[in-house]
Image: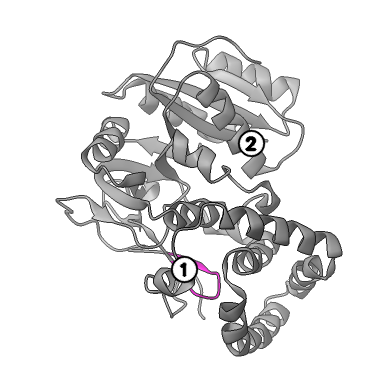
Amino acid sequence: MRKTRNMSKIGIIAVNYKDYANRFIDDFIDRLNSQTFNDFNLYIVDNDGTPSSFNFLLNKCPNATILTRTNANYCAAMNFGASAAIEDGANRLVFVNLDVKFDKDLLMELNNAMDKQQDCAMVQSKILLFNAENKRIINTIGNQIHYLGFGQTVGYKQPDCEIAELSEIKGYASGVSFMIKSEIFKRVGGYDEEYFMYHDDIELSYKTRLLKQKIYLAPKSIIYHKYEFSRSIKMLYYMERNRFLFIFQFYKLPTIVLLLPMIFCLEVGMHFYAVIGHWFRVKLNADFYFWRISTWRKIMLKRKFIKTFRKTNDKEMFRSFNSQIQFAEIEN
């Protein structure tokens, strides 16, 4: 469905998939309707939607634009929603999960943060764990990139702390809740739909930083995330495939050659870890993706595109990378 919208400064894009809306839409809409900043349009993309899911969303969100797609590509859905928002005149885009509960000042604080920092292209909310809302436990206050392609949260499961000022995120903005300038989003080509899902926020943030644009944390923009680690591990194929896709798309050839010994050693360990974790077949499928000629054609086209806007080199980017793999949910 597409309808004419009032020209608005901010377009909010969220994606539904299967029963997500049934589980999460009530909290999402309730808190969105109570925002202190109300100059926005909401776009919900019903990914792999059905007439039933479309009608459900239309009934629950009568003021939103409901867009439907016929497959489950999350990155394509985000681009679809962003295109609609930009067409309606949005000069800032907010990408947000459905499985969240907003603080009433979330949008105002994101917008104020971007107004305050002239060099800011993206700004992330402070993301707290929903189940610990009263205890105020951190989900992430900005994410780090490991040099072998892993993404890692900062502050996970630590008690919330006061952060008085905007702080630069040297890694990447979490896809749970962030704002980006529409002009930057278009300049870097939006989301790479080849990623399908996972690592999409790393890929978009990294392209932004290659432009020498900065990413900030807006500490007073609070959102509570109904995070379920068990939901993430079902997508191991995309996690494994996309971290290598990231390396091959963005790192220059001398960098890749330099990293080959570390990549080899890690891969030996990852295959062993996949065997004992009973997901070895998933790991092999991710590996086989890179044995296709079509995959390398896409990678080379992406590398060519990145050259058209890249303003910094690997050495400079690597200064902000993490060298250890640490995550509280797994023993590694």
Left or right for 168, reference 143: left
Above or below, comparing residue 143 to residue 78 in the picture: below
Mark 1 burial class by Cα count in 10 Å: few <14, some 14-19, many 20+: few
**Label 1: which residue?**
313
Residue 89 shown in magenta: no
Quarter in which the N terminus is drawn: top right
Amino acid type of the residue that numbered disc 1 sits on in the rendered structure: Asn
Residue neighbourhood size for the residue with mark 2, other residues' Cα within 10 Å, grouped as few (<14), some (14–19), many (≥20): many
The percent position of residue 242, horizontal first and vertical second, equals 64, 62
Q: Main secondary structure of the magenta part?
A: loop
Q: Residue at x 83, y 70 (%)?
A: 291
Q: Residue at x 36, y 64 (%)?
A: 154
Residue 262 sits above or below residue 253 on the image:
below
- The disc labelled 2 sits on which kind of residue? Ala
Nearest to the eye among marks 2 and 1: give it: 1
Q: Position of residue 192 (x, y in %)?
A: 63, 48
- Determine which quarter of the picture holds residue 159: bottom left
Q: Which residue is mark 2?
A: 77
Identify the element where label 1 is drawn: loop
Look at the image and give the residue range highlighted in magenta.
145-152
